[in-house]
Image: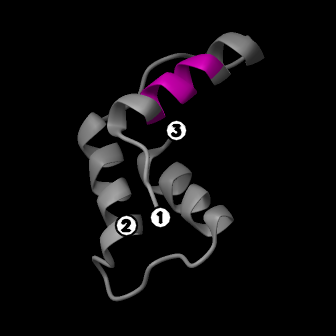
Amino acid sequence: MAYPSVELVLAFHGQIVVESGSTESGVRSKDAIESTLQYVSEDFFGEVPETLHGKVIAVLKDTGL
């Protein structure tokens, strides 16, 4: 499975901010995004979300996006 880059996640976030008009732009930490992407792709903690939905939820939850 291919995973997005940090830059692509930031681009998606920016697009969502523009389209929603009710969300503030910016992220707390690019490092958090990188760490989370690594977690969902490399089995960092002995468990990797199995579904795409589970992976998206992990990214959103862990990065605060």
Position of residue 65 measured from the top left corner of the image (x, y, whole percent)? 52, 38
Residue 9 vertical position relative to residue 21 in the rendered view, above or below: below
Q: Mark 1 and mark 2: span between their CA atoms?
A: 8 Å
Picture quadrant where residue 19 is located: top right
Query: Marks 2 and 3: in contact by CB < 8 Å?
Result: no
Q: Identify the residue at image location x=41%, y=66%.
A: 40
Magenta span includes 11: yes
Q: Mark 3 and mark 2: span between their CA atoms?
A: 18 Å
Q: Identify the residue at image location x=36%, y=40%.
A: 5
> Which residue lies under the disc numbered 3?
65
For badge 1, the amino acid type reads Met
**Taking 35 as reference, is 11 left or right?**
right
For badge 2, the amino acid type reads Ser
Query: Marks 2 and 1: in contact by CB < 8 Å?
Result: yes
> Which residue lies under the disc numbered 2?
41
Dominant secondary-structure state across the stretch colored magenta: helix
Disc number lying in front (3 or 2):
2
Position of residue 2 measured from the top left corner of the image (x, y, whole percent)? 44, 56
What stretch of residues is rendered in magenta?
9-15
Neighbours of disc 1 within 10 Å: few (<14), some (14-19), many (20+): few
What number is the disc on residue 1?
A: 1
For badge 3, the amino acid type reads Leu
